Image (cartoon, helix red, strand yellow):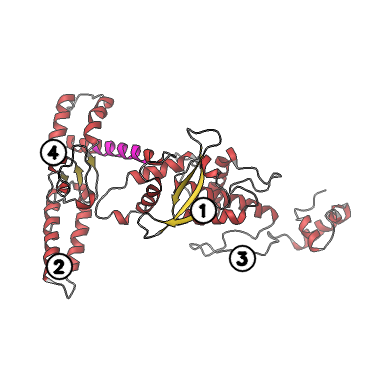
Amino acid sequence: MDDGGVNRALIAQLCRAGKTALDQDFTIVMLREAVAELGLEPGGMETPISPDPVTGRPWRDRFDHKSLLWETRMLVAACYVVTAYLSGMRDSETQSLKPGCHFTEPSLDEVVERHKLRSRVFKGREAAGEEDTWVVIEPVAEAVAVMEALTVCDRLFYRHGFSSRNEGIGNTINSQLNLLRDRLGQVRAHDPIPPVDGEPWRFITRQFRRTVSWHIARQPFGAVAGKIQYKHLKVAMFEGYAGSSVSGFRAEVETERQLAQLEHFLDQYEDFKAGVRLPARLTAEFGRIREELGDFPGKVVDTARLRSMLVSPARTYYPGVLNDCYFEASTALCLTRRPGAGSDAEPVMNHCQPAKCPNSCVLPRHQGAIESVLADARQLLTIRPITALQKAALQQQIDQMRRMHKQAGTEGG
């Protein structure tokens, strides 16, 4: 018999009655009459509800035993996203985390405390895997702490509400991720996850590792590197790998970096064909490639052959904020402090002299960053008191930025 949608188990507890006391037909009739007279409201568990910082309204209804279980599963999915995305761990490595996996140790320079996780690597290993350590950032440590508060077994990520308390989320995680996507669309309708081609984006676990490696690999080096949101993440994660990772994440970042270099080089080649004024070295290189390909108006060029011809020079092309570096060890001013550097050397970013080095490529897209540096330097000149040496250094920087601004295509003020 329909009971009107009331939570009979909760009412029995409040009445201090047995679980079956409200299963009788006459009690169900009474409940239906009460519902018709009084109505229903969600909840039953009086717990604090945080307001949404944008709308100022509660982000959820009050908990009952069903909604509590549902939101617990959503919380597990959210903690999984934070952990997998900001650690670079594979799905199997994330799901192998256990209570007590988090610990802290001093960084290599002993300046800061690093958050670390212990888990197991399975790819290319025996069935049982091998224990390994990941360096992570604070949000990951916080997500792990939340999961440790929720767990009642020897694993962090398990299927809450199932008969076996030790049953892992396994291959159900992709479904949970997309249920979380839908839930976020409900509670944050003002900030939804954008659809793709009119359809909701389908999340899978592999996307997190690939996305973070993409972002880390494609951040430009240069004067404002410290302002890039993924810079700290890269430093922390790479410190843990110390040059090589049994997990393979660093190799994936390097692959993404090489792809980014090639794509950027292709963009520069298209600019060259469109008549954009480029530095002499780029103009000469692209002119040679265009002549060899016969890449002139009216002729269709084999895209695969073009990419293969650009792969080699692209390996030494480094996109930057104030300038790009078309690196040549023999002429690189950044290597002047490293006499005898071989042909396999790489640019030393902290010693870049973009206004002087023949490897420097200042392009129209760098104008905005150069103008920002110019404005900052001019502002500093107005500060009082300022020493003669400081004034001379600032004026030198302004002169260099003006020359670079001119190289980028517009005369600096």
Give the number of the disc on residue 102.
1
Instruction: Nearest to the eye among marks 3 and 1: give it.
Output: 1
Instruction: Nearest to the eye among marks 3 and 2: give it.
Output: 2
User: Which of pointers 3 and 4 lies earlier in the amino acid sequence?
Assistant: 3
Is residue 13 within the magenta segment?
no
User: Which of pointers 3 and 2 lies earlier in the amino acid sequence?
Assistant: 3
Depth check, front residue: 209 or 73: 209
Which residue is under mark 4? 281
Depth check, front residue: 181 or 111: 111
Which residue is under mark 2? 390
User: Which of pointers 3 and 1 lies earlier in the amino acid sequence?
Assistant: 3
How far from the left and from the top, in percent, is residue 277? 14, 41
Q: Tags 4 and 1 in contact by the CB under 8 Å rule?
A: no
Instruction: Nearest to the eye among marks 4 and 1: give it.
Output: 1
Mark 4: which amino acid? Arg
The Cα–Cα distance between marks 3 and 1, rounded to whole angstroms, is 28 Å
The Cα–Cα distance between marks 3 and 2, rounded to whole angstroms, is 55 Å
Relative to 392, is 63 on the left or the right?
A: right
The Cα–Cα distance between marks 2 and 4, rounded to whole angstroms, is 35 Å
Name the secondary structure under disc 1.
Answer: strand
Relative to 10, is 157 on the left or the right?
A: left
Mark 3: which amino acid? Pro
Which residue is under mark 3? 48
Which residue, as the protein is rendered here, is positioned at the far bottom? 385
Disc 3 residue crowd, few under 14, some 14–19, many 20+, Cα 10 Å: few
The magenta region covers 253-265
